[in-house]
Image: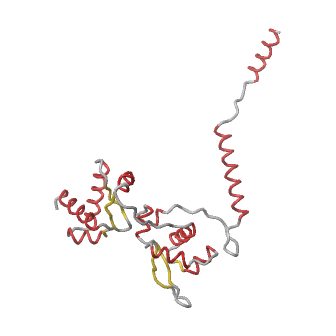
């Protein structure tokens, strides 16, 4: 298949879809292998980067989506009516972070971590399509589990969950609470390490003893 024609076909599909399109869908439409699709799309990404264009192709899991560049947000937003956006409270952000870092987590486990009832927050996140039910676990009552959606990845700019920032690791006690003493100890160690690094990078100048004696002798003679 001619490369430019394939690029045009993929661009048309992504534009018309208005959503993330799975690699399998592109393979079926173009009758091409996954390797060919990936190679073509990666080349298209470079085209968008080189040319000063307002569009880009982003990865969302095993799918692609055509969207506008962030740098043109202000220009685009001024044209359209103010659209409803998810208004995430601190509680919602906390719950969302817990689910993102703990795929297939239950409601009870979420509430155990947060220490408060999370029914309303979970319902709101489900309504915003940021999380979804991922199944049930083999436990009394068959509790459901939750995970984040592709909409979460798209909204926060991640291709997959492996791109989430690494969390700090601290010891926890028998109640699964962070041990504050260990946190403070780690902070103190980091501060001492920073001070030591500064001292090592900028040592005090060492003056030659003979040079000091000569300077003192000259000063005495002048007096």
Q: Residue at x 65, y 36 (%)?
A: 202
Q: Residue at x 72, y 26 (%)?
A: 207
Which sits in the foreground, 160 or 204? 160
Tell me where residue 178 sits by quadrant.
bottom right
Q: Is residue 65 above or below residue 108?
A: above
Q: Position of residue 4 (x, y in %)?
A: 19, 56
* 40 to 49, vertically: above or below: below
User: Who is closer to the viewer here, 68 or 45?
Assistant: 68
Q: Is residue 181 left or right of residue 123?
A: right
Q: Residue furthest toward the top?
A: 222
Whether residue 25 is situated above or below residue 196 in the rendered picture? below
Query: Which colour scheme appears in the figure?
Result: secondary structure
Please count the marks in the image: 0
Left/right of residue 184 with respect to residue 125 in the rendered view: right
Q: Quadrant of residue 24?
A: bottom left
Q: Residue furthest front?
A: 81
Quadrant location, the N terminus = bottom left
Residue furthest bottom in the image: 140
Q: Position of residue 139 (x, y in %)?
A: 55, 88
Q: Residue at x 22, y 59 (%)?
A: 7
Of the pair 108 and 103, the residue shown nearer to us: 108
Q: Left or right: where does residue 121 sit relative to residue 63?
A: right
Task: Locate the C terminus by quadrant.
Answer: top right
Residue 217 percent across, percent down from the top left = 80, 14
Residue 90 in percent (x, y) is at 57, 66
């Amino acid at each position: 298949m001619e490369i430019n024609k394939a690029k045009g076909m993929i661009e048309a599909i992504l534009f018309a879809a208005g959503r993330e399109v799975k690699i399998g869908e592109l393979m079926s439409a173009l009758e091409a292998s996954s390797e060919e699709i990936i190679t073509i799309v990666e080349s298209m990404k470079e085209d968008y980067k080189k040319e000063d264009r307002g569009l880009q192709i982003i990865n969302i899991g095993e799918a692609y989506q055509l969207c506008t560049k962030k740098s043109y947000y202000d220009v685009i937003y001024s044209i359209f009516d103010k659209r409803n956006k998810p208004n995430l409270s601190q509680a919602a952000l906390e719950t969302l972070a817990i689910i993102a870092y703990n795929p297939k987590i239950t409601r009870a486990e979420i509430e155990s971590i947060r220490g408060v009832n999370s029914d309303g927050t979970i319902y709101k996140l489900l309504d915003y399509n940021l999380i979804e039910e991922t199944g049930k676990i083999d436990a009394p009552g068959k509790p459901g589990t939750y995970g984040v959606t592709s909409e979460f990845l798209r909204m926060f700019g991640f291709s997959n969950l492996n791109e989430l920032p690494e969390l700090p690791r601290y010891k926890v006690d028998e109640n699964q609470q962070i041990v504050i003493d260990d946190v403070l100890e780690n902070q103190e160690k980091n501060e001492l390490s920073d001070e030591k690094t500064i001292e090592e990078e900028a040592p005090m100048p060492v003056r030659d003893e003979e040079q000091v004696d000569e300077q003192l002798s000259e000063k005495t003679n002048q007096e």
